[in-house]
């Protein structure tokens, strides 16, 4: 018999990191908010965190919090929606300042400034900025639980391999820096600095980011501290996507903690004589795929959440979803 969400949390007192993964539009943000709400009601200090550039938590909580730091929504419940682009710009400025200070320059040479701008456009930079922020938050240990609503790329688990991606990027930058050695040596000579005294600020900063990612990756692969939940809906593509995700989890030595089946129409509606043909066919289709979901994923299923008659936004609806999520019990 599968463990319910309530049973899962009650049996794992060491747990402090909860991650919801899956494709966009399936309800990850809603379930992240609902889980955070429930944990806060249990007296736990909780930070619900999003790296999604679509500002989905702002939408769910019905308040513009994107890029505005940690916000309080209820007792013990805190929410943060990071503006990764803003963080990257701040990072760029810090790099510029350090180079100016190091070489006693009044302004950056054009080619160096262009290099910094192009580096920020690297695919790894956006992810590095968000995961760096996540590692930074967890390292402070200010909250009992960190609940992450991950953006819909690679089910949010690509973060585990980010240290390796960053390694490759650092190698690439090192190669570029070797090509720029002649310019650096000329600048060092003009400023009276020796090669031993020089320090590559960009590589130093990236190495520090990688160290934080290593810290975070260690947390993610610790099943005692971290729980990964997949969210799916009763449709064919979502089922196939979840099967692929399970293989990805296995290849990265991550234990899937559970699956939440979301947006399920109550089958009792089929008894209504005034039910429209459209809705009848929709429910019948879902029930067919629910049988497939139970067959393929039964040990992982932690809750089945109904389709609501309105969007699950605002604290009142978040509380409702929370109640459904943590009061669900196995029955077939």
Image: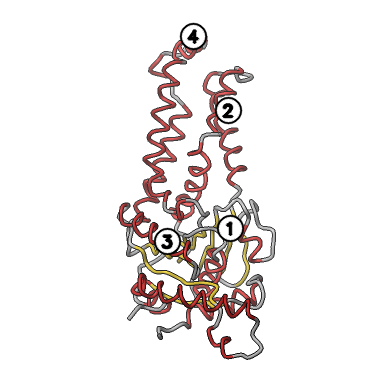
Residue at x 51% of width, y 66% of height = 46
Which callout, 2 or 3, points to the residue nearer the camera? 3
Identify whether 74 is placed above or below 79: below
- Secondary structure of the residue carrying tag 2 is helix
- Residue 309 x, y percent position in the rendering: 65, 78
Query: In the image, which disc is placed on residue 96?
Result: 2
Q: Compare marks 2 and 3 and give the one earlier in the sequence.
A: 2
Q: Compare marks 1 and 4 and give the one earlier in the sequence.
A: 1
Q: Distance between the residues labelled 1 and 4?
A: 45 Å
Q: Mark 1 points at which residue?
A: 80
Q: Compare marks 1 and 3 and give the one earlier in the sequence.
A: 1
- Secondary structure of the residue carrying tag 4 is helix
Q: How far apart are marks 2 and 4 (CA)?
A: 19 Å
Identify whether 121 is placed above or below 86: above
The foreground one among 236 and 314 is 236
- Residue 164 x, y percent position in the rendering: 36, 40
Asked if the residues shown at circle 1 and circle 2 are in contact, with their CB atoms under 8 angstroms apart, the answer is: no
The foreground one among 284 and 202 is 284
Identify whether 108 is placed above or below 246: above
Q: Compare marks 3 and 4 and give the one earlier in the sequence.
A: 4
Q: Badge 1 local density, few (<14 within 10 Å), some, or many (20+)?
A: many
Residue at x 36% of width, y 54% of height = 248
Q: Compare marks 2 and 4 and give the one earlier in the sequence.
A: 2
Q: Mark 4 points at which residue?
A: 186
Q: Compare marks 1 and 2 and give the one earlier in the sequence.
A: 1
- Secondary structure of the residue carrying tag 1 is strand
Q: Badge 4 local density, few (<14 within 10 Å), some, or many (20+)?
A: few
The foreground one among 205 and 159 is 159
The foreground one among 137 and 51 is 51
């Amino acid at each position: 018999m599968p463990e319910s969400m309530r049973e899962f949390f009650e049996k794992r007192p060491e747990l402090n990191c909860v991650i919801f993964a899956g494709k966009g539009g399936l309800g990850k943000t809603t379930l992240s908010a609902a889980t955070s709400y429930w944990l806060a009601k249990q007296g736990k200090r909780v930070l619900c965190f999003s790296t999604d550039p679509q500002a989905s938590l702002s939408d769910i909580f019905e308040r513009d919090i994107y890029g505005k730091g940690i916000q309080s929504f209820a007792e013990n419940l805190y929410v943060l929606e990071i503006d990764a682009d803003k963080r990257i710009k701040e990072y760029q400025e810090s790099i510029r300042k350090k180079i100016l200070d190091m070489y006693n320059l009044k302004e950056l040479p054009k080619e160096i400034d262009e290099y910094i701008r192009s580096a920020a456009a690297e695919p790894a930079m956006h992810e590095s900025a968000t995961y760096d922020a996540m590692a930074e938050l967890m390292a402070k240990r200010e909250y009992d639980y960190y609940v992450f609503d991950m953006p819909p790329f690679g089910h949010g688990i690509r973060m585990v391999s980010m240290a390796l991606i960053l390694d490759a990027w650092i190698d690439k930058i090192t190669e570029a820096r070797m090509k720029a050695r002649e310019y650096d040596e000329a600048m060092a000579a003009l400023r009276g600095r020796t090669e031993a005294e020089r320090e590559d600020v960009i590589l130093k900063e990236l190495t520090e980011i990688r160290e934080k990612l290593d810290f975070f990756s260690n947390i993610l692969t610790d099943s005692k501290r971290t729980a990964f939940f997949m969210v799916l809906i009763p449709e064919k593509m979502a089922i196939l996507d979840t099967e692929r995700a399970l293989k990805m989890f296995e290849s990265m030595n991550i234990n899937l903690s559970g699956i939440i089946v979301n947006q399920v129409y109550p089958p009792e509606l089929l008894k209504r004589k005034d039910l429209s043909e459209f809705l009848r066919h929709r429910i019948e289709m879902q029930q067919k795929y629910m049988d497939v979901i139970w067959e393929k994923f039964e040990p992982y299923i932690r809750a089945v959440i109904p389709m609501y008659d309105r969007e699950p936004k605002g604290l009142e609806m978040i509380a409702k979803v929370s109640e459904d999520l943590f009061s669900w019990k196995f029955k077939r």
